[in-house]
Amino acid sequence: MKNFDIDTEKHRKILLNILDEISKEKDWNESSLQKILRKYPKNGKQMFRKDELVAAYTTLLKRSDDTVEERIRMKPTRTNSGVATVTVLTKPYPCPGKCIYCPNDANMPKSYISSEPGAQRALSNKFNPYAQVFNRLVALKSVGHNIEKVELIVLGGTWNFYIEQYRLSFIYECFRALNDVGKDTTEYIDPESTSLPIVTWEDLEKVQKENENAYCRNVGLVVETRPDYISEEEVIHMRRLGCTKVQIGIQSLSNKVLRKNDIGRTRQDTQRAFEILRRMGFKIHGHWMPNLYGSSVKKDIADYKKLWSKKFSPDELKIYPTSIIENTKLHELYLKDIYKPYTDEELEYVLKRILPLTPRYCRLTRIIRDIPAGDIVAGNKRSNLRQIVEMSLKKDGVFVGDIRNREIKGESVDLKDLVLEQIEYESTVSREIFLSYNTKIDDKICGFLRLSLPKKKYKRKHFLKEIEGCSLIREVHVYGKVLGIKDRSSGESQHLGLGKKLIGIAEEISKDYGFEKISVISAIGTREYYRKRGFSDGELYMDKKL
């Protein structure tokens, strides 16, 4: 594949039309670019990539246009959270669930539709994991992002429902792509095949070992699954793959609502999944849905409050207001006037009531699904809903204090301007401690650590002997512009030594609570970092005697 798909006269004309519309659009908002790209598809189906627009601007446009340049520039926020995020999708595959709201796109893994941007990238790469990772890294790099620290997010229905060999081969190919992209890589590739190689655990361990010192190191690996597919055996399997975080569907904590939506599991399944994941040190990223069939404004607000009890308390959360998509059971109920979506005012009311309730230790990653408005029959179609709600709250003097709203992003900081905050809360299996360095004046969060202290009952006996009796570092994250592995900080949060300081504090707290050893759920690409902090390699974790 050539660097940019502008080698034909047809594509040159299309790209010039796109750039012209971008320049002339008066009412520009977050969804404007996507609307224009969908209007001018490449090869009649897929959208042009952002880096192709950048290439067209620099090579085809005969004039300088600040408006176009600003509007096509890749969002700096993609790497302002401290890592470069690469999202890949698994192949189309059945799901054990029969949720009435779930899209049924035969070309996509369950719950995704072909028009979503991430889904389009997966489709154009034939769902080949190597090509998806490789080409996404090249795309990010081509528009100026540092790709040395990569969080890999694997989406697509229920991960644990795929056969074991597919999961093993998929992750193997992702790591192989991470290892193959170097500092000077600029060329995109075509997917070699839709089929994956048959590999062994030894093959995976080999590419993982190589990634410890690769140019693109994996600093986090995320998979998506259902609570009722979480078991002690499964989480050990996920750790062997290198997973550090799990996206898990909560949807609702009401068994009645779960039954009405044919979700096929219970609130108790979710609680058990949280307990197993937390005991293994995983970060827990929940998905919660207001406006489900059988719920109400009042019930949703009450349900959100339950999320922060010791039975749950996710580390991150996506809020997905229910959307009505064609050819779903919920669409049938809507047409029969049995189900009614919230009005814009009702949905805003719910969000205004619940967002301020979010604890400071949680990150609200998203407020809506990335589904194009044209595919939504009814329900929220506003891509800037979060902005609307938060601006309204701000006018009322209310600030949402979750992590995402307080991230330092690309701002410069000085150690003397930071203050340490310690938040403690209980789970059913542990005492959780959230340590963070925040700016004194405006409360911006620069770095944090999640420490889990197993309760006596769970400290004595663990289904994984390796971490029995250990305190657990579940996450160390420093925000700000991504710096290279060997770069020095010139005011950015990264490489100021915040991670080292937080680990030292976590060790002291662990000793105070009587722990003699501390373990960390290290990603493959952060093993070198923890070795330098005195941690030793175990089978699935790294640990240090206190």
Image (spheres, grey):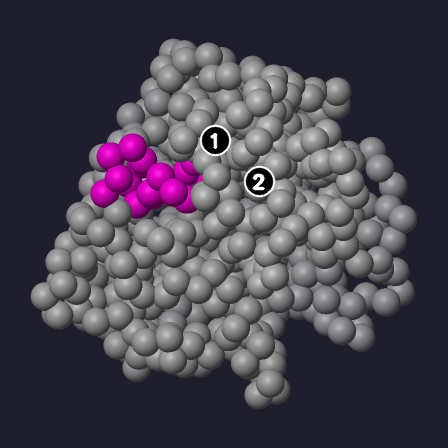
Residue 366, given in percent of the width and then of the height, sits at 49, 58
In the rendered view, does 331 fall on the left or right side of 521?
Answer: left
Identify residue for label 1.
42
In the rendered view, does 274 fall on the left or right side of 239?
Answer: left
Q: Nearer the viewer, residue 248 or 321?
A: 321
Residue 19, given in percent of the width and then of the height, sits at 62, 42
Q: Look at label 2 and name its amino acid.
A: Asn
> For the point 51% across and 55% down, which residue is it?
31
Q: Which residues are magenta?
A: 104-120
Q: Look at label 1 and name its amino acid.
A: Lys
Main SS, magenta residues = loop
Query: Is the N terminus in the top left, top right, bottom left or bottom right quadrant?
Result: top right
Q: SS at mark 2?
A: helix
> For the point 57% across and 40% down, which residue is it?
17
Q: Nearer the viewer, residue 95 or 440?
A: 95
Residue 3, given in percent of the width and then of the height, sits at 64, 21
In the rendered view, does 151 fall on the left or right side of 61?
Answer: left
Q: Is residue 109 magenta?
A: yes
Q: Is residue 456 visible?
A: no
Marks 2 and 1, how far apart at CA: 12 Å
Q: Quadrant of residue 350?
A: bottom left
Residues packed near mark 2 inside 10 Å, few (<14), some (14 to 19) or many (20 plus)? some
Q: Which mark is residue 17?
A: 2
For residue 163, above or below residue 337:
above
> For the point 31% across and 36% down, which residue is it?
109
Q: Which mark is residue 230?
A: none
Residue 469, given in percent of the width and then of the height, sits at 52, 47
For residue 204, above or below residue 397:
above
Q: Residue furthest bottom?
A: 396
Q: Is residue 232 magenta?
A: no
Q: Is residue 242 visible?
A: yes
